[in-house]
Amino acid sequence: MAKKITLLGSTGSIGTQSLDVIRAQGYEVFGLSAHSQTDKILQQIEEFHPKYVCMTSEAGAEKLSAALAGRADAPKLLTGPEGLKTLAAMDGPDVVLNSVVGIAGLGASLAAIESGHDLALANKESLVTGGHLVTQAVAKHGVKLLPVDSEHSAIFQCLQGNRREQLNKIILTASGGPFFGKTREELVCMTKSDALRHPNWKMGAKITVDCATLMNKGLEIIEAMRLYDLPLSKVTAVIHRQSVVHSLVEFVDGAVMAQLGVPDMRIPIGLAMTYPNRTHNPAPALDLLSCGPLTFDAIDETAFPVSYTHLTLPTT
């Protein structure tokens, strides 16, 4: 059965890849949101015909309103942060996918959950800044929280069919980004353009820079602690340059399960949308005979001081 999707942050990297999946699945778009990229969301409106659209910036809302003026088929326009929460809470979609960047996504995440929607979450700030609020709301309202980050989707998949109390450790993988192997002294000379040259993934600028510094891995450690109610001692990370093993779970009997795939965000996005089913995905399948050797290295704590090894967090 075709699903209806509300996609928050539709003009960003995750948003546009989510629309690739929606297009491939033949799903219906109930609502879209963007901050200021009016031209891009106009193209999305033309193709997907959402019933509702939210522009969170005032200038973007004014420009979009003018572009849609007089059109009988125009979607209803919502504006600002409150409009984003209203859209997230609306009856109609089967899944709300939140790929808004930054803390602005937390209110929308909570609005979707409190309205009884399953939430596909790509907005890591929702968990980093308000993780207990999100997980408590999920438990209270009995909805599904479906992780979209490749690492947390991998963990989610490895835990299927296993009891949570048998989990011993979560092992997140990090590509190491463009600065792998460089010393602290060498990193002083690196520029923004250097940081944006990720070897494996195509992502937005913020998360690409965060990956280069390993800040992103620290945030994902916090996410894992919140999602699975684990202390820091039970969550670790290793460098895996090939970005084929997306994360691993170690169980109390010593067994380790991993999820593998090509480095393409459409795979975890697709699973979050189609869950509990798996269907055809526009991303290519992994060819084990051509992907090369799979290697693992420790994180260099001296060169990357913002990595998880320096986190000090409460356990609640």
Image (tube, rainbow, N blue to C red):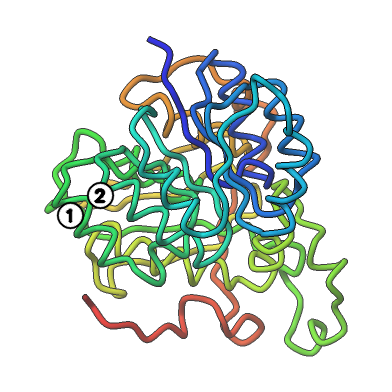
Badge 2 is on which residue? 114
Looking at the image, tell me whether mark 1 or mark 2 is earlier in sequence order. 2
Seen at 13% across and 52% down, the residue is 140
Question: Please, is residue 1 above or below residue 292 in the view?
Answer: above
Q: Is residue 120 left or right of residue 305?
A: left
Marks 1 and 2, how far apart in space? 35 Å
- SS class, disc 1: loop
- Tell me, for residue 252, which label it has, or none: 1
Seen at 29% across and 59% down, the residue is 134
**What x and y, as percent, mark residue 90?**
37, 38
Tally of marks: 2
Question: Please, is residue 264 above or below residue 80 in the view?
Answer: above
In front of the other: 167 or 277: 277
**What x and y, as percent, mark residue 12?**
68, 47
Question: Please, is residue 281 above or below residue 86 in the view?
Answer: above
In front of the other: 260 or 192: 192
Q: Is residue 58 left or right of residue 297?
A: right
Placement of the N terminus among the 4 image quadrants: top left
Seen at 60% across and 16% down, the residue is 24
User: Which image quadrant is residue 225 in?
Assistant: bottom left
Q: Judge the density around disc 1: few (<14), some (14-19), many (≥20) Cα neighbours within 10 Å.
A: few
**Residues at circles 1 and 2 in contact by the CB criterion of under 8 Å:** no
Seen at 27% across and 43% down, the residue is 115
Amino acid marked by disc 2? Glu
Q: Is residue 102 left or right of residue 46?
A: left
Which mark is nearer the camera, 1 or 2? 2
- SS class, disc 2: helix
**What x and y, as percent, mark residue 92?**
37, 27
Amino acid marked by disc 1? Val
